[in-house]
Amino acid sequence: MTDQSEASIFRRLKGYVKDQGGEIFHADNLYPGFPDKLILLPDAKTLFVELKKPGGTLRPGQAYWRKRLQGMGFKADIFYDYQTLIEWIENETQSD
C-alpha cells in the first residue's frame, strides 16, 4: 500500500511540480486554515492546495479559505490523496 501521509504526498507532489517546470512553496502558518501549499506552474497558473491525511478533519478556517480563494477566482481545494490531487492539477491547468 502506498504511503498517503501528508508528508509522503508532499514529497511526491514536489517532484511532480518540478517535472512540470513549476515551483511549490510550503506556506504553513500564514493565517489559520490558509492552504499550506502554493503551486506556481508555467503560463502563470497558480494553485492553492491543502493536504489532509485520509480521514483527516477539515477545520472551519480551511473551509473558509477554500471558499474565499475560489470566490476570488483562484484554483484552490483540499485533498486527501495523491492521485486525486494530480488529476485535479491536470484538469485545472488544461482548462484555461
Image (cartoon, rainbow, N blue to C red):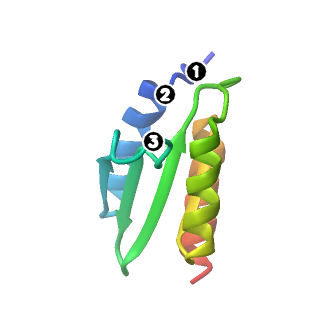
Q: Indicate which label's residue lies in the foreground, 3 or 1.
A: 3
**x, y percent for residue 54:** 66, 25
Q: What is the x, y in percent for residue 73? A: 57, 77
Residue at the location (57% across, 24% down)? 4
Find numbered disc 2 in the image and state the secondary structure of the residue it sits on: helix
Q: Residues within 10 Å of mark 1 (few under 14, many from 20)?
A: few
Q: Which dot marks residue 32?
A: 3
Would you call the spot at circle 3 few (<14 residues within 10 Å), some (14-19), or many (20 or more)?
A: some
| SS category of the residue bearing label 1 | loop
Q: Amino acid at mark 2?
A: Glu
Which residue matches tag 1? Answer: 2
Secondary structure at numbered mark 3:
loop
Residue at position x 63%, y 67% in the image: 91
User: Which residue type does callout 1 highlight?
Assistant: Thr
Residue lying farthest right? 55
C-alpha distance separating marks 2 and 1 = 12 Å
Marks 2 and 3, how far apart in space? Answer: 18 Å
